[in-house]
Amino acid sequence: MLAAIAEGRLPKDPGLRERFGTLPRAPIRLIAPKLAKDVNQGGLLRLAEAFRLEGVDFELTDTNECDLRGAVGGKSWQPHRWIAPVEAIAEARERGFRIVALSLEDGSVALERMDWSFPTALVVGCEDIGVPMELRGLCDESVAIPMYGMVDSLNVSVSAGIVVHHMVSAYRKSHPEFLPAREASLRLLE
């Protein structure tokens, strides 16, 4: 990594570590029920950190396992907690969040047609069952990614990544002051 910085391939961001905690976060929460593969916990955490989301709520597995290996350094920078998803949804609603399920079902809005408002909590599911029925009933609406191939689902981290990118892009339209922390990404938006 140091060689890459010295060669100018990776930007230096002096003082970023010190000021990162003061940067505003997008008013978006991820709520994840028990996932089929624990490694997806780390992927969701890394995603949330990459887009500087407000937080991530995870439900522990039946064996209380957690696997944040996929988060790399994100787990030390991204707010997250372990909480039952029903409680996380109730708390988000109490705080004025719109609750949206990421689920392909009758009545879902295609991602490209979704009219985002904030704050929003995105409830994700797992590959085998999606968002559990008891949680879908607690959501205000659902959004889905149109699929063009034979496969009818994506990995939870991949699908959440696609939707979160759309959400943050929509948020930036009304809040242009919400900017990337790193210079290289900031230059992409100029």
Image (tube, grey):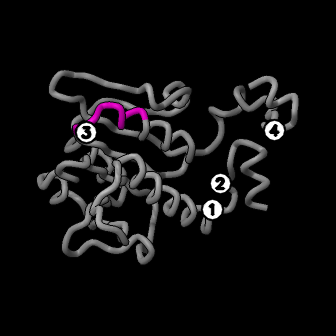
As drawn, the residue found furthest toward the right would be 7
- The percent coordinates of residue 117 (x first, y second) are 45, 66
Amino acid type indicated by mark 4: Arg
Residue that carries the numbered disc 1 in the rendered image: 175
* SS under mark 3: loop
Mark 2 or mark 3, earlier in chain: 3
Q: Is residue 164 magenta?
A: no
Residue 114 at x, y percent in the picture: 41, 73
The magenta span reads 34-42
For residue 22, side relative to residue 75 (left or right): right
In the rendered image, the vertical position of residue 9 relative to residue 124, given as above or below: above
> Which residue is disc 4 drawn over?
9
Mark whose residue sits in front, 4 or 1: 4
Q: Are marks 4 and 3 in contact (CB under 8 Å)?
A: no
**Residue at 37% across, 56% down:** 97
Q: Are marks 4 and 1 in contact (CB under 8 Å)?
A: no
The residue type indicated by label 1 comes to His
| Amino acid beneath label 2 | Phe
Mark 3 burial class by Cα count in 10 Å: few <14, some 14-19, many 20+ = many
Choose mark 4 or mark 2, whichever is in front: 4
Q: Say left or right for 27 vs 102.
A: right
Q: Which callout, 4 or 2, points at the residue further toward the start of the chain?
A: 4
Quadrant for the N terminus in the image? top right
Instruction: Determine the CA span between mark 4 and mark 1.
Output: 30 Å
Residue that badge 2 annotates:
178
Checking the image for residue 35, the label placed there is 3
